[in-house]
Amino acid sequence: MIQKLLRITTVLALIALVGGLGRADVLRADDDGKRPPQTLQSGFESTDRLLRDVERAEKAPLYSAWIVESSRFMNVPFGGFQPDKAGLNTTVNLPVNVGIIEGPDHKLTLYDSGWKQLAYIFDWNTSCCWKGIRDQLTAIGHDPSKVTRIVLGHAHWDHAGQLSEFPNAVVYIQKEELKQIDFFLHYPVDFNAGHIRAVNTVDPLTGAQVGPPEQACARTPVCGYPPQTVQEILGKVLSGKAKIVDGRHEIAPGLVIHPAFRGHTYGSQLLQVNTARGQLVFGSDTYSSWTGIRDWLVANIQQTDTIQQFLAYEKCYVLTSRLNSFNNCVAAHEPTAYTSAYPLTANWWNIPQGNCSRAAELILAPGKTTHVPGNPDRVLCVNTTPPAHVIRP
Amino acid sequence: MSRASVLLQLWMTPKTIVLSLLVLGLVGVLSFATMRELGRATTPAPVAPEPARPTRPALTAAEEAFIKAMTPIHAEVQRSLMRASLGQILYKTNDLSSTELKTRMTQALATYGRAETGLRALEPPGSLVRDHERYVTAVRLLQESAVEALKMFKDGKDDHLLAAYPKSQEASDLIREVGGKFWPNEFPPN
């Protein structure tokens, strides 16, 4: 009897092992000869190469890092954000986080630049807490004039706004990001009677534009890019303040861009930052949800190839494998951000005169003084009072 | 042989061993899952009461009809502006030829012209006259910007693109302002 059981168990274990290896072979980026299917060469990085980036970064200077909440989407249908975890008819509030990275030379790099579409606050009215990023930087003890670089995780309007607020900063964006918008502007309307368009998708029956959750526009690849956002990128290109990169790019020792093509948009990119708590990896919307990375669930999948999102999660696992693992992946819209449930962001506070927007100190370089106030205000608030700004409501 | 060792021998049959291992395994899995869930439990931040949000006023029938009539014009303007902007970017990165850029800018200028004609043919309700004027201003700015940009194909100087930029940027700001009011769901959360 025991021998029979042992035989069955051995066979089952072998099947599980072979199955496990098979799955790993599909998702793991082991070496150049095993590039996952449908992955662009310029977006591919083998595990070995990523680990070499970790080794190199560990010899580089240490950076300090914070995030601030540019704004907050209120009452978003949960299913549209993280379908595997959403209950029926539940909603969620989503922060829109911007990374602030300070180097040994005290210059600042922003990861994403928040949003500028203030009309949403007044006319659509489903968001709160917007505050101009220059004011936010000042309020948490940084000098906005020290911002010399802006790395765009992707160029959607809620992440690539306010570029013109930093005329001297150099913007880093992937060429794939620009090429995909251009490509899908030519979306053919010949076969669908014209109601599905690259921009301005309309209801096929009424001809009217419709909003969430019924809207379809968010699923077309161009929908997240208003002309205003692309214009701001153009301004950077024309003034010689843009670096159009193609794949991996080392900005400075310990500060490395990693491609995450189709991890959210076609030209999404991550930012590896060398810190005293190991490598931080900022992921913009490719890392929309930190619990998604932790639990291996997709999130914010509008234009996402979900396999590529998982591969981007794996890049974070590899880059953070020496210290803190997934706890060092920095998410853009994690609902639990600014609470102890997302430990990296637990040291948070309400930005003074920040219209309820929040900041969190992620890690300091040795010798750096904290920016967290002595008695931090940590009462979560929602402020619907329109902030003062140049645009008329 | 003691009574205890006899009992142990009786109990340790292959069946009971396998059963015990299964039970132990299940208990282990349950304990791990419970610990993991408990580990995730956290103290939520105190929450200030959320004030009632003001609602957007409903449009009148006249306003709605006007906005609907503007929608196709707006769609064409936005698409042309995007193609022109990206055309310039891709030209600067050597991913688009000068000839292709010229075609795009010429097409954009024609679209803006048609848009202005279409907009002027519309009669906005009193409440939207100001927004209508702002949109017309934006389209005028886009035409001026395109005319300036097209000069580069006459004298070969890229500087015209830089000179053309402030007007197209101002126009895109105006369009987004009016667009946010007329088509509030146009660019949903991403």
Image (cartoon, coloured by chain):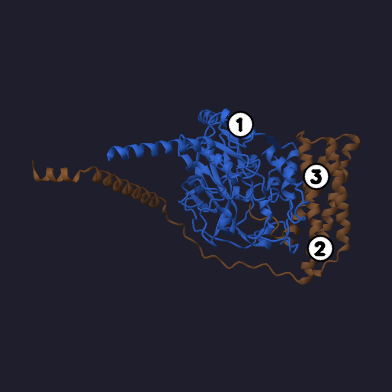
Residue A375 position, x and y percent, is 47, 53
Image mark 2: chain: B
Q: Is residue B137 left or right of residue A117?
A: right
Q: Does the CB distance between marks 1 and 2 fall below 8 Å?
A: no
Residue A250 circle label = 1
User: Which residue does the numbered mark 3 point to in the structure image?
Assistant: B84
In the picture, one chain is blue; tell me its letter. A
User: Which residue does the numbered mark 2 point to in the structure image?
Assistant: B69
Examine the rendered structure and indicate whether residue B45 appears above or below residue A100.
Answer: below
- Asked if one can make out residue A196 in the rendered structure from this viewpoint, the answer is yes
Q: Residue at x 50, y 48 (%)?
A: A291
Query: Chain B is which colour?
Result: brown
* The quadrant where residue A178 appears: top right
Examine the rendered structure and indicate whether residue A244 appears above or below residue A163.
Answer: above
Residue A119 position, x and y percent, is 69, 58
Kind of residue at badge 3: Ala
| Crowd class of label 2 (few under 14; some 14 to 19; many from 20; radius 10 Å) | some
Marks 3 and 2 sit apart, C-alpha to C-alpha, by: 24 Å
Q: Nearer the viewer, residue A72 or A268?
A: A268
> Does label 2 lie on the same chain as label 1?
no
- Tell me the mark number nearer the camera, choosing from 3 and 2: 2
> Does label 2 lie on the same chain as label 3?
yes
What is the quadrant of the C terminus of chain A in the image? bottom right
Q: Does the CB distance between marks 3 and 2 fall below 8 Å?
A: no
